[in-house]
Image (cartoon, rainbow, N blue to C red):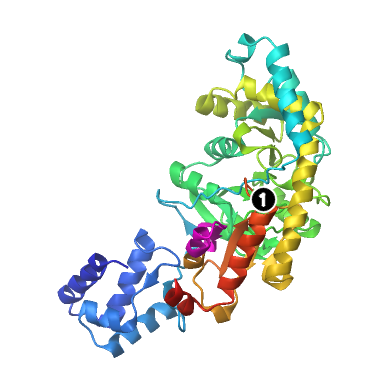
Amino acid sequence: MSTHELQRWRHRLESEKGTPAYRLIADLIEEDVDSGRLQARDRLPTLRDLASAVGINYTTAARAYNEARARGLIDSHPGSGTFVKGRTVSVQPSRGDYEMTMNLMIEPSIPTLVEQVRDTAISVMAQHDLYSMLRYQAFGGSPRSKEAALKWLDQRLSRAVPEQVLVCPGIHSALVGLLTKLVDPGKLVCVESLAYPGIKAIAAQLGLTLHSLERDADGPLVRPFEEVCKQGNVAVLYLNPTIQNPTTTTIPQSRREALADVALRYSIPIIEDDAYTLLSEEPETPIADLAPELTYYIMGTAKCFGPGLRSAFVHAPSRRQAQRFAGAMRALYVMSSPLVDELVSSWILDGTAEAMRKAIRNEAIARLKLAEQYLGRQRIASAKGAFHLWLKLPKASNWNPSELAVQLRGHGVSAVSSAAFSTDNNPPDALRLCFGGPISRDIWEEGLQHVADLIDQPAYLSSLTT
């Protein structure tokens, strides 16, 4: 917390003598959380530093923090400090510095596979009319692109039809279009209490309000979802149900059925972001098959082939909804790239994309075994085929997740604090670790050694040795 902010608190204390100082400090913390000046996991001054900075005694400072703690605003960890906890479940995110460290897919170093990818790309450029791929086209994809999209979607959906399929320039772009189309001003977007940071950034940009749903090891709880639906203000439910980013949770069949049942009873549209589903060999039934008349189902190529392609496939609930969504996307993006669409279609139709998916999955399983070896299975949540894991910090270490993430990134480990994913201002003591990107298996193993060394070392000791 900056000296300037503490000076502001001191001026308020001096100008509002009628309010007990301990209560006013708790009020100031609450105001700063609500305004966004204080964010979840921000460190607050020690009791002695607070007392000195704002001109009160130690006992009053302790009462102030006790009052703020009773209101659910802060949390303290002996030996580590006092941190902002936050408490709201419905928030309109402010535009700002969202942590958007990308979850990069593994890049298989298999010469024959790389050659196969290259050969298909050369063939596309050599055999197709170049100008046809440089012209404008109607939004939603050519017949050939839709053929490829259906082949991709058919690996999960049981009843995909071409009239309801749209080829889009990436999942993130599709989410922008869907939220623009589905959410009226003042309505709520239901999300899990830990969610893809991109959904937070999109909501901030569009001025939308996120409603955080409490979750457990199986995903979002059903009762909180139904309770908010009863209030009649929910516009859409957003889910990332298979190998969720960040926790790697796959929502089991029974929970999917219960969530779909609530959505059907209250007519709540669902956005099913299934970006990671093809990394799993044991997929659950898509929610789109349980509530097809409500669900916009999304798959893409970023996590199974390459994020640079910016290609995604959306299956809308009906032909009419597909047309309406196409209109929204046309207004936002004009069209997807015909050249990218043709490359993606060729890689899917000739089997190259499937070969890439299998190679990514096999390497991810090998790297996960290393993580289990160095970190222990009890410390991590993971899924076979995923290239990220969820690391739960031991209480004894007293590490602040944000500070540990900074330390790990300094060692070349792609670590992101739980605060980046939190939608309820109460992030757990955890990190997402990504083991994809251009790193090799050896570099990942070296990074794991740094992770193991740091989390087994108390935070205060690390500060003395770095």
Left or right of 459 in this view: 37: left
Which residue is nearer to you in this view: 354 or 32? 354
Q: Residues within 10 Å of mark 1 (few under 14, many from 20)?
A: some
- Tell me the quadrant of the picture where the N terminus can be found: bottom left
What residue type is disc 1 on?
Answer: Ser
- Residue at horizontal 61 percent and vertical 59 percent from the top: 433
Q: Is residue 126 above or below residue 49?
A: above
Q: Is residue 37 above or below residue 108?
A: below
Q: Which residue does the numbered mark 1 point to in the structure image?
A: 440
State the extent of the magenta-drawn residues as a range: 405-425
**Where's residue 17, x and y in %?**
17, 79
Left or right of 420 in this view: 44: left
Could one spot residue 28 in this view of the protein? yes
- Residue at horizontal 75 percent and vertical 43 percent from the top: 288
Quadrant housing residue 394: bottom right
Residue 411 magenta-drawn? Answer: yes
Residue 61 magenta-drawn? Answer: no
**Where's residue 210, x and y in %?**
51, 53
**Where's residue 173, x and y in %?**
56, 35
